[in-house]
């Protein structure tokens, strides 16, 4: 199919519909409102249902219900709206239900701003709901990747019976880029024999629930979930590495800032520097395996984020004190410039010499 | 296109004012480049509360009206996207009618909703219905960002030609990156506007 020009938010909607999503429950919020808008126009045409809920909390609980009945379902929001959904996400994870949640991050904390940010890293990787749960979290860096990972997210959600988060920021949501909708490979997914689709008098009722009256039974459930999360950690780490071989310094970034970092890297490499880039595609699981590819020559890691440095902790954990870990970023809705990243890199290189 | 058209008119020595009427969406608006435009001598009018990008408010400064009645000024109104965006134009309708206007409808054949004649007509008619003004010209703005080729522009041109014939509206502008414009056939209808991609940072 020929490429079309779409905004990130529109492309997510189209990708979801093509992935078989037939239900969208949401509440509008800048900078992701084009997603519910797209769904409201196109889902009914695909035989689906778009419903604007009275709140984000209502929307995520509608997702809980639709997912429990075996449907492919999605919700989307931005930073403060995703914060509101946390309790429901914990319930969905606890009940082991698949769904896809999109967060087009904006400046925070609180109501924050409507400009792009990445300050929901902690929220995305640690979660805000109660209990021992994890979300597989993809962080695409272009509109095309958004399309590809939204489609994959539905499969992974079904495969692991777990909510999958797709995070972007306002820029990716609003930016128009050429995209291609590729036919998705037929995936070998397990039947949804747990869904509440009616017994037909042939089996005992399926019950969707996250409440356990027996502590030891809940502990067994948590052990089962932990095993699942370990499987996700083992199998689902994704990253892109560019120019790691011989790199003096490697930038660690994801999404929009990875693109800014890449431009900075290319500018400096043209001047004879040796800079590499490790771009996270999954925020959780954190791509530890990618860091194993780092070259002996690499003395410093520079985390670039549109936050006050939320990802730095995870980079320090995986780094185990081997290299210098630095940070540069902007927050509150300000986009860092390539010049800012270049200046910071030069400052680090000068200090190391 | 609005920013690039303003730049071209300024380079021709005209007095130019750009009114950014996009109140639908705060991202990628002409006002983001107000500083660059003002440096070139192009006056930018947007919200009564300034050009700040975080203002998600339907507030448009009527200062732009000053320029409507200045016979030396070329006023460009950048109206957001579709018929919803066109609502913001209605407040200036009487002025626009009294000073005379050109209303340009952009044709981007790679946008799914305007990729065929039916889609274009739907949007064109929606914009005319809301504004109660008449589209007087078409602009070919079909592109693939930095990868735009002559055949991309021609795809848009051919589609615009169909719309032009259907509605009897001339193609007034063909917009593309400067190096693509140079390679276009010479006999195309409409003035060529070099696109500066002012709103795209180097990494976009």
Image (cartoon, rainbow, N blue to C red):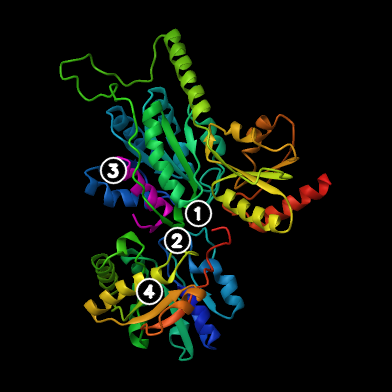
Identify whether B33 is placed above or below A285. Answer: below
Which of label 1 and label 3 is nearer to you? 1
Q: Can residue A20 be found in the magenta stretch? A: yes
Farthest residue to the right: give it: A353
Which of label 3 and label 2 is nearer to you? 3
Q: Can residue A228 be found in the magenta stretch? A: no
Which of label 1 and label 2 is nearer to you? 1
For the point 84% across and 47% down, the residue is: A353
Tags 4 and 2 in contact by the CB under 8 Å rule? no
- Would you name the residue on which mark 1 appears? A171
Q: Earlier in the sequence, mark 1 or mark 3?
A: 3
Q: Earlier in the sequence, mark 4 or mark 2?
A: 2
Q: Subunit of mark 4? A: B
- Would you name the residue on which mark 2 appears? B57
Query: For the residues tagged 4 and 2, is the chain the same?
Result: yes
Q: CA distance from mark 3 to mark 2?
A: 25 Å
Quadrant location, the N terminus of chain A:
bottom left
Q: Secondary structure at mark 3?
A: strand
Which of label 1 and label 4 is nearer to you? 4
Identify whether A35 is placed above or below B198. Answer: above
- Would you name the residue on which mark 4 appears? B140
Residue bounds of the magenta highlight: A1-23
Q: CA distance from mark 1 to mark 4?
A: 25 Å
- Would you name the residue on which mark 3 appears? A51
């Amino acid at each position: 199919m020929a490429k079309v020009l779409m905004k990130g938010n529109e492309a997510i909607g189209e990708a979801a519909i093509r992935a078989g999503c037939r239900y969208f429950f949401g509440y509008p919020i800048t900078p992701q409102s084009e997603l519910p808008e797209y769904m409201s126009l196109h889902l009914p045409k695909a035989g689906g249902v778009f419903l604007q809920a009275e709140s984000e909390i209502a929307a995520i609980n509608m997702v809980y219900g639709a997912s429990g009945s075996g449907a492919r379902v999605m919700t989307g929001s931005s930073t403060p709206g995703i914060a509101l959904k946390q309790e429901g996400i914990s319930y969905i994870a606890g009940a082991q239900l698949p769904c896809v949640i999109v967060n087009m991050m904006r400046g925070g904390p609180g109501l924050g701003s409507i400009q792009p940010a990445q300050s929901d890293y902690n929220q995305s990787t640690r979660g805000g709901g109660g209990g021992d749960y994890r979300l597989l979290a993809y962080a695409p860096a272009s509109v095309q990747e958004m399309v590809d990972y939204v489609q994959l997210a539905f499969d992974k959600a079904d495969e692991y019976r777990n909510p999958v988060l797709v995070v972007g920021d306002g820029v990716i949501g609003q930016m128009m880029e050429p995209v291609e909708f590729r036919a998705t490979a037929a995936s070998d997914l397990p039947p949804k024999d747990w869904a509440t689709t009616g017994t037909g008098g042939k089996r005992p009722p399926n019950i969707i629930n996250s409440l356990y009256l027996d502590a030891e039974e809940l502990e067994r459930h948590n052990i089962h979930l932990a095993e699942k999360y370990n499987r996700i950690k083992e199998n689902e780490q994704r990253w892109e590495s560019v120019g790691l071989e011989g790199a003096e310094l490697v930038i660690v970034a994801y999404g929009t800032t990875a693109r800014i970092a890449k431009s900075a890297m290319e500018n400096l490499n043209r001047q004879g520097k040796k800079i590499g880039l490790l771009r996270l595609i999954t925020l959780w699981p954190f791509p530890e395996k990618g860091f194993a590819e780092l070259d002996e020559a690499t003395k410093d890691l520079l985390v670039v984020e549109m936050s006050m440095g939320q990802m730095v902790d995870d980079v320090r954990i995986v780094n185990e004190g081997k290299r210098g870990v630095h940070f540069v970023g902007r927050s509150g809705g300000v986009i860092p410039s390539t010049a800012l990243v270049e200046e910071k890199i030069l400052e680090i290189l000068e200090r190391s010499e | 296109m609005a920013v690039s058209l303003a730049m071209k008119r300024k380079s021709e020595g005209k007095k130019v004012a750009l009114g950014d009427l996009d109140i639908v969406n705060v991202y990628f608006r002409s006002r983001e480049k107000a500083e660059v435009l003002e440096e070139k001598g192009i006056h930018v009018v947007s919200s009564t509360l300034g050009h700040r990008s975080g203002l998600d408010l339907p507030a448009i400064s009527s200062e732009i009206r000053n320029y409507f009645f200045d016979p030396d000024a070329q006023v460009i109104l950048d109206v957001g996207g579709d018929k919803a965006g066109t609502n913001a134009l209605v407040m200036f309708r009487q002025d626009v009618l009294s000073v005379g206007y050109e209303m340009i409808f952009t044709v981007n054949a790679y946008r799914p909703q305007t990729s065929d004649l039916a889609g274009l007509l739907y949007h064109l008619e929606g914009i005319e219905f809301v504004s109660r003004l008449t589209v007087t010209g078409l602009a070919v703005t079909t592109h693939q960002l930095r990868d735009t080729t002559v055949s991309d522009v021609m795809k848009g041109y051919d589609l615009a030609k169909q719309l032009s014939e259907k509605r009897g509206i001339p193609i007034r502008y063909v917009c593309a990156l400067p190096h693509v414009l140079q390679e276009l056939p010479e006999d195309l209808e409409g003035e060529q506007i070099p696109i500066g991609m002012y709103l795209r940072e180097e990494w976009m």
